[in-house]
Structure formats: structure tokens, C-alpha cells
Image (spheres, rainbow, N blue to C red):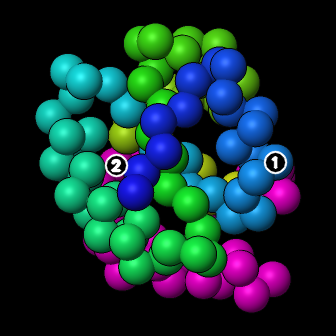
Amino acid sequence: MILNLNNSNFGEAILNNEVLLLDFYADWCGPCQALHPTLEKVAEQMQGKAAVAKINVDQNPELAGEFGVRSIPALFFVKKGKIEAKAVGMQTSQVLIDKLNEIIAK
């Protein structure tokens, strides 16, 4: 399951999930929509180890600004509230899963 985060529940999600993959997206963004099935697969395979969350940049510009999002989709790998890695654009589920497992193992 992919979490939908916004300004009000973001802090709680960071506290409740040791490892989090954040996807900054917009509804009008074609690559963002194309990435969604990949993120669902990652969320399913990483259940219990890492959470996957989406943040709409149009509805949450403050969060996008905090993370320095310049283009979307923008992916941030967060562990214990700290950004460990980031990626922009389309990614395969295996690349995302490998990166999450690498961060979990740190």
C-alpha cells in the first residue's frame, strides 16, 4: 500500500517508518503516472521493511520546497528522517528495491 502524505501527516510518517521511499509527483505528469504501478510493486515487495509514500507537489509545495524538488517524479530514500539517496525520473522496481535493501542494511 502506498501512503499519501501531505503537510499534516508527513512528520508522523517519518516517525513511524524507519525507511521510506518518497515519490514527489503531480497528477498532470505523464512519467509520474507511468511510475505508479512500479511503486505499487515496490510497496508490496517491501511491506514490513520499508514504506512507499506519494506527495503531490501541487498540493504540498512547502514539502517539495523543503526537499528541493526541481523536476518530477522525484524519489527520495529516507532512513530515520535523513535523506540517504535520491533519483529523478523513471526507475525500475528492481533498482528501487535494491536501493531500499542497501539503505536498510546500513
Earlier residue among tags 1 and 2: 1
Q: Residues within 10 Å of mark 2 (few under 14, many from 20)?
A: few
**Could you say whether the residue bearing mark 2 is in a helix, strand or loop?**
loop
Going 70% across and 76% down the picture, which residue do you hit? 103
Disc 1: which residue: 15
In the image, the segment drawn in magenta is 79-106
Q: Nearer the viewer, residue 43 or 35?
A: 43
Viewer-side label of 1, 2? 1
**Could you say whether the residue bearing mark 1 is in a helix, strand or loop?**
helix
| The stretch drawn in magenta includes residue 89 | yes
Q: Nearer the viewer, residue 9 or 74?
A: 9
Going 81% across and 48% down the picture, which residue do you hit? 15
The amino acid pointed to by label 2 is: Gly
Q: Residue furthest bottom?
A: 105
Disc 2: which residue: 89
Q: Residues within 10 Å of mark 1 (few under 14, many from 20)?
A: few
Answer above or below: position of 21 versus 34: below
**Label of residue 106 in the image:** none
